[in-house]
Amino acid sequence: MATNTKTRDGGPAMSRSASRRTHGEGLFRFLSTAAGVVLLAIMAAIAVFLISEAIPALRANEGNFFGDLVWEPNSSKVFGIGALAFGTVLSSALALVIATPIAVGVALFISHYAPRRLAAPLGYLIDLLAAVPSVVYGLWGVTFLVPLLRTPSQWLNEHLGWFPLFAGEGIIGGKTMFAGAVVLAIMILPIIAAISREVFLQAPKMNEEAALALGATRWEMIRMAVLPFGRPGVISAAMLGLGRAMGETIAVALIFPATFDISFQILTPHANSIAANIANGFGEANDIGRGALIASGLVLFVITLLVNMGARFVINRRKEYARVGA
Amino acid sequence: MSKQIQVSGLDAYYGSHKAIEDVSMTIEPRSITAFIGPSGCGKSTFLRTLNRMHEVIPGARVEGKVLLDGDDLYAPNVEPVSVRRMIGMVFQRPNPFPTMSIYENVAAGLRLNGRLSKSKLDGIVEESLKGANLWNEVKDRLNKPGAGLSGGQQQRLCIARAIAVKPQVLLMDEPCSALDPISTLAIEDLMAKLKDEYTIVIVTHNMQQAARVSDRTAFFNLAEQGKPGKVIEMDETSRMFTNPTQKATEDYITGRFG
Amino acid sequence: MTTTTGIQHISAGRRFKDLFVKALVYLAFALAVVPLVSVLWLVISNGVARLDLEFLTHSMRGIGARDAGGGAYHAIIGTLEQVLLASVISVPIGLFTAIYLVEYGQGGRLSRAISFFVDVMTGVPSVVAGLFIFAFWILFLGAQFSGWAGALALAILMMPTVVRSAEEMLRLVPNDLREASYALGVSKWRTILKVVLPTAFTGIVTGVMLAVARVAGETAPLLMTVFFTNSINNDPFNGPQMGLPLFVFDQAARPNDTAVDRAWTGALTLILIVMLLNLVARLIAWWRAPARGR
């Protein structure tokens, strides 16, 4: 601002190229503003085109989009989002329940427990988890994890079968909601751990020292000075992880058995999700089928948008709070 | 409730750098001992070795002996946590826990050592806040966040928090350097009152403050930058400020350097 | 040391709790590393057998469902072209957006909106980005499946990452440098071009490479944009292409061992490419990083 005026009335030596300079200045400002606007336009376009291409299929739907538990847009033109949305929410919620405690532990390990010299490389090791492509996790999941989880699944079913999630008869284990949730948990762990680690590292050193000087053990110090400070950050990290899990496609597409029912029995082979259904169904879909998949993608877009905006809201509030506290 | 500290042959390191060398002194109970000296001379480092806060910094270590009424704080079977429980500390910048209320801040240390009944806790919190000359100012808003207080009030809150656990010794690391003159005066008054019960050690940059509040003064200095700090002289404050035996002390006190 | 006047030990309960939490924290870390090691080990041990010259130089054309042999050349070419095109689209837009946010936006309403939606865009599921390009490019504009369509979808996924990392790097450039340049009478845009961007350059390169590494492994958006082929198609603007992640997905979904073997080798190749990009990015960052304390 002050610097702008300084450049505008620059010295006489530079007045010769003044018009070229203002051209350049104008162009540069235009380009950068335009780039930002393009970004906003893309977000708007995603919503607009998903809606406009979903409408014909939704019109042709002879069932109830929000009520039916079938997905047959190609043949009987009946399709409903219910089972898929349920699968998306349940699998992501399970993944979150598995991943969050471990991720917080990992974050604390890096920020407050690991020897200082090892902290950075070990943190990088966790980041590498995020670098493994989704399809590789899918391949690993079907060939290695699914068989591995069969015995523990049967054990859980046998001994804790009274708990609704572990209930079920017939085939136990295999390509289940549980197996998919474990893979999702592994995939969202690095992002939750990375954000939590950052907020834990930002916990004011002077408060940590205050706690130690009162005679707190390391854990008591963390409970007094680190966790309360980091809580909003961990919450938003978990929400971002949740959004990631909901949109995760290929790994679960390989694992989920593509059923269309609502079942809380996570150890039986009943599982699907919006994203997995899109990946598995796209190749064989006709026009209405593709429109139906776009409609389901729109639902996924809206859900993840809400979750992400919620997470950002929490983060932004925390920033203000941190500024006051500092 | 107040103990004597005897230090002998103490060296403190940050990694391979020796910050202070061969410090020996006796700190008397129920009195205020002040550490003065130019910046970087190791007086704060030395203070932090007295409650084993020095070793919190990665790579930092200590050699030598610190005896609290004869018990070695650095004996192998002594835990730093227990030492800090007995030797309280007040820091340069007021550091109340930002997520806790005034009440919770004072109660924070008490809660570590097992559950107390609500009435007992209330009693100690009130007593500590009174002890820190803060009770009248905050008694109507004990459940408000501690971060909402003024700087001077926050520092007194930190003192209340430190004395709530009834330590034997109170270490103060430049407690007034971030405060205005009126708040500084309030803290100095408080120190004079607290010394009836506690062994108080204060690090200060402000020589007038050392002269006003302390009974004994130790002057720290270092030969040159990068060399370890040492105790040059330690004596009754009145004698130190009128008739120091060392030339360096006199130069520092009269403002010729530092 | 148990005399009443001496230094008391802390209670057994507190000590136990402290050790217990410590054990949990170490356990959590170990638990997190196990899948990483397991994935890498299986990918290497299963993938290395077919990592031969044929795999790297041949396509799947004419290879029957049960046949051994065949390769991923068509997929590797496709991935490289798609990722390159995606970078060509997203880097300028992302970089200019970052410049707007740091140098021109000045916290106004537009810049706050952009900043917020960049964050939200980070969370757009990759499959939704693919569906959007399908709906817009292929259904609405009537274009065909192509590598370019895939690149468009990948570009959407890259943009927010590029903006965020570039923004962070631009903000690290000290204001003194800008002011020194203004004081010499240099205009704002020339200052950005000649002073700010060169200072932030390596950081921005690192960010772009991490973004590339991230999208190089994306499968879902390719399904509905580049579609699928078993043949070599060197032209990203014409007709369906293949991508390495797509290749892995396709082969992994087939029931016979020869296909799964190819999937593992494809996964190994993909991980090698992604890890290489990651490593190079981090090496650049580490090599040129100013000592930042903590």
Image (cartoon, rainbow, N blue to C red):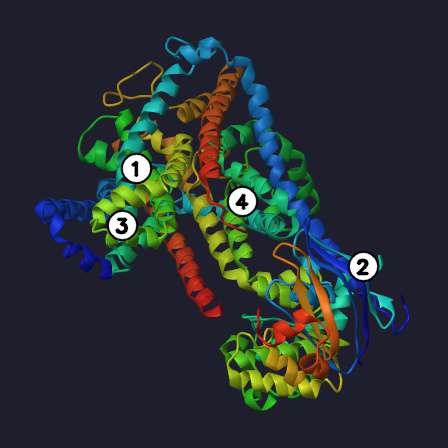
What residue is at 75 percent from the left and 70 percent from the top? B85
Residue type of the residue flagged with mark 1 = Val
Q: Is residue A144 left or right of residue C73?
A: right
Q: Amino acid at mark 4?
A: Leu
Q: Secondary structure at mark 3?
A: helix
Mark 4 surroundings: few (<14), some (14-19) or many (≥20) residues within 10 A: many
Circles 1 and 3: CB atoms closer than 8 Å: no
Q: Which mark is residue A254?
A: none
> Closer to the camera, B221 or C167?
B221
Nearest the viewer among C34 and C15 is C15
Q: Secondary structure at mark 2?
A: strand
Type of amino acid at the residue the image marks with label 3: Ser
Nearest to the eye among marks 4 and 1: give it.
1
Residue B64 - label: 2
Numbered label attached to residue C91: 1
Q: Chain of mark 4?
A: A
Q: Chain of mark 1?
A: C
Q: Chain of mark 3?
A: C
Q: Residue at x 30, y 32 (%)?
A: C86
Q: What label sits on residue C181 in the rendered view?
A: 3
Q: Do discs 2 and 3 share a chain? A: no
Q: Which residue is mark 4?
A: A189
Q: Chain of mark 2?
A: B
Q: Are marks 2 and 1 in contact (CB under 8 Å)?
A: no
Residue C125 is situated, as x and y percent measured from the top left of the image, at 38, 42
How far apart marks 4 and 3 lie (CA) works out to 44 Å
